[in-house]
Amino acid sequence: MKSEIVWMIIGMGLVTYIPRMLPFVLFKGMELPPFIQGVLKNVPYATLGALIFPAILFLQKEDIWYGIAGAAAAFVAAFLGANVIVVVLGSITVLALYSYFL
């Protein structure tokens, strides 16, 4: 039983690692066209939007402003060009303050 779990963890690690490693190996030393670079720069923000928007629809305590505050904080930080981690942490901070004070 335990060996099955170990093999499953190893398999999941490989399945996760290989797609992340392949682009580095296949495109090593190649310069991507500017259009593709622009698209790839926006992927984290598109993913973040896909994660945040559904969460707005499932409101905490039926408070619509809770979802709007988190989305607005994330949107403003992303619009200003912040790193994805900063966008997420900024949104979390705004929602923590919102919960604490209201």
Image: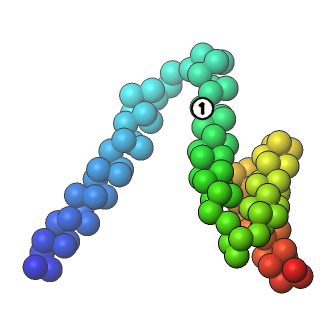
Instruction: Give whichever of 98, 1 is nearer the camera.
Output: 98
Residue drawn where x is 60% and y is 16% of the image: 33
Number of numbered labels in the structure image: 1
Identity, as a three-letter code, of the amino acid under mark 1: Leu
Q: Is residue 27 above or below residue 14?
A: above
**Tag 1, which secondary structure?**
helix
Q: Quadrant of residue 9?
A: bottom left
| Residue 31 visible (yes or no) | no
Instruction: Give whichever of 76, 4 is nearer the camera.
Output: 76
Q: Position of residue 3 (x, y in %)?
A: 12, 75
Q: Quadrant of residue 60?
A: bottom right
Residue extending furthest toward the right: 101
Q: Which residue is mark 1?
A: 40
Q: Is residue 3 above or below residue 83?
A: below
Q: Position of residue 5 (x, y in %)?
A: 19, 73
Residue drawn where x is 80% and y is 79% of the image: 99
Residue drawn where x is 59% and y is 22% of the image: 36
Colouring style: rainbow
Circle 1 residues within 10 Å: few <14, some 14–19, many ≥20: few
| Residue 34 visible (yes or no) | yes
Residue extending furthest toward the bottom: 100
The quadrant the N terminus occupies is bottom left
Q: Position of residue 28 (x, y in %)?
A: 46, 29
Q: Is residue 33 left or right of residue 77?
A: left
Q: Is residue 81 left or right of residue 56?
A: right
Q: Position of residue 88 (x, y in %)?
A: 70, 60
Residue drawn where x is 65% and y is 51% of the image: 53
Q: Quadrant of residue 102?
A: bottom right
